[in-house]
Amino acid sequence: MQFRLYRVLAFVTVALAALSTVASAAASSGSTACPNDYTGLKLPPGFCATIFADGIGHARHMVVAPNGVVYVNTWSGAYYPPNEAPPEGGFLVALQDKSGTGKADVIKRFGETAKTGAAGGLGIALYNGSIYAEVNDRIMRYALQPDALVPTGPAVTVVSGLPLGGDHPMHPFVITSDGSLYVDVATATNACQLQNRTLHSPGAKPCTELETRGGVWKFDANKTDQKFSPSDRYATGIRNAEGFGVDAADHRIYITQHGRDQLHANWPELYKPEEEATLPSEEVMLLKQGGDYGWPECYYDPGQGKLVLAPEYGGAGGHTVGVCASKIAPVAAFPAHWGPNDMVFYNQKQFPARYHDGLFIAFHGSWDRAPYPQGGYNIVFQPLAGARASGQCEIFADGFAGATVSPEEAVYRPSGVAVGPDGSLYVSDDNKGRIYKITYTGGAQAGEPQFTPCPSLTAPAGEVVKAEAKPPEGTHSDAGTAALPVPPGATHDMVALGSRIYHGEVANGTCTACHGENGAGTPLGPDLTKNKWLWSDGSWAGITKTITTGVSLPKQYRSPMPAGGGAQLTPDQASAVGAYVWALSHH
């Protein structure tokens, strides 16, 4: 009996010692448990995330008031599925956490609605006690009464007549402490081609689009009824600067740049298929008055570390610099097509010192890396020293997309970032309307915090993404392309070949980038499974003709489809893809 008791006591003593060791190790690493963290995000040690709000609409940019109220602009533009009903109430949303639980328990909508002809917007800011927000072609100002959660009076117009339409119809903006209002007026096209996104179409000379697009415009936030005019252009040669980061102490403004698309698709003799996925870099640039950042003539080549001449303007596959030698190079570069949709300068102290005075960037995620693995769908931190990058960037928050990283399968997609007065970082998602709140709870840390570095800018594209391996007989009676119907005159082998081209396994097909892995559509391209056709009668021959010639002016989607879907298809290959698309629509 005594022997058994001794063994029990010895076991308990060892167990307690082990628990003490684990607790000590946890304490020394600075990590603590994260209560109420059901986000599934991957964060550095010591950081926690909560779901601050959910289901508020297609949340884009945010701003946090000194009292901690989060204001969000939501959008229902052409980027999202056609005919999708926006949430009831205004497109602007106020979120307040009155109970201190890390979750908004007061949610109020305000501003213009779909019934008044609005489609929402991206840009939002706070200045002198008022909320400024983009709606359609305007920047509006909503006065906030002291201690009020939402404005009650009518909005006034600050700027109107901002260009709409084209590839990038949004108007994100920022307001500095002196009232300067900087508005991104992004490009209407991919590369200012005579025929947008079309094989071998040359660039316009001159690119007259730059008169009213492709730059940052400056206005005065203290004035009303200002009209958009080419004369107010502050900087040019900027394809799409959705993110602004303001370093108020040093009077610097950083902007993001969405790099151009379709180098291989439009110039296959100059670029390898994998270079569609790896060129060009996304960028962060230092905004300068009168600055020219190179679009459409130039793009940033990460392998060479410099701006090079675009093929539409005589570039030879990255081997010519030309006029790009006189353009302004980026402060920092990032992997191609990740989609930097917002950015914020971290000027608070809650996070460890590594993160002070650096940039957090929301990468919405790629589509033009198909048929190779997609990238982005994360929050990246870029450290700065002065006005330059001071080291490799960090994957700060990941896991938003879920199990499958692709435009059509991603569960959540980062679209906005904002810093609260307590130093917390807020992240918006424009897929399901989720807002995350990220805090640091790890306490003081010895040495540099652990972090995940960004991949190399010259990393290969990876292997062509294929569907998960399945038994050849399938898992049910209608598995695989063998079960798909066949258009009259075609064969099962033709449908199977079309499937392989569609999924990028043959002929460098890129169809999944816009239409999705299963043909169910994405924000960039329509659903092919519904047997609804805008450009043909839906016959095999009609579908094949549309694939062959492309769609230069889409009716319901903002991005045109180049001939062959961006691949160099033979007539037989185009016919095979047409047969597969017909089969999808009749399945």
Image (spheres, grey):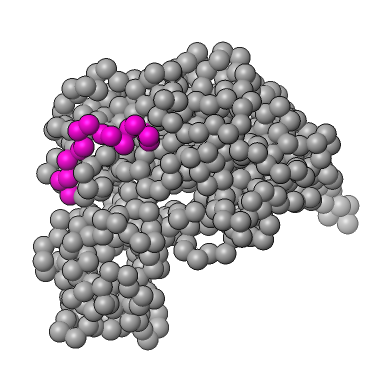
- Left or right? Give the position of 552 relative to 557: left
Quarter in which the N terminus is drawn: bottom right
Quarter in which the C terminus is drawn: bottom left
Of residue 482 and residue 45, the one placed in the foreground of this image is 482
Residue 242 in view, yes or no: yes
Which residues are drawn in magenta? 199-214
Q: Where is residue 173 in the image (x, y as percent from the top left)?
A: 53, 33
Q: In this view, does 434 lie above or below 217?
A: below
Magenta span contains residue 211: yes
- Left or right? Give the position of 190 relative to 540: right
Pick out the residue farthest to the right: 2
- Which SS type dominates the magenta stretch? loop
Magenta span contains residue 225: no
- Left or right? Give the position of 275 relative to 467: left
Residue 31 in view, yes or no: no
Q: Position of residue 233 (x, y in %)?
A: 42, 26
Of residue 305 and residue 262, the one placed in the foreground of this image is 262
The image quadrant that residue 389 belongs to is: top left
Q: In this view, does 84 lie above or below 368?
A: below
- Left or right? Give the position of 265 relative to 365: left
What residue is shown at x 70% (from left), y 50% (from top)? 110
What residue is shown at x 17% (from left), y 45% (from top)? 201
Q: Position of residue 315 (x, y in %)?
A: 16, 32
How many discs appear?
Answer: 0
Q: Position of residue 269 (x, y in %)?
A: 11, 44
What residue is shown at x 56% (from left), y 56% (from top)? 117
Of residue 158 and residue 173, the one placed in the foreground of this image is 158
Q: In this view, does 30 lie above or below 511?
A: above
What residue is shown at x 69% (from left), y 23% (from top)? 349
The image quadrant that residue 507 belongs to is: bottom left
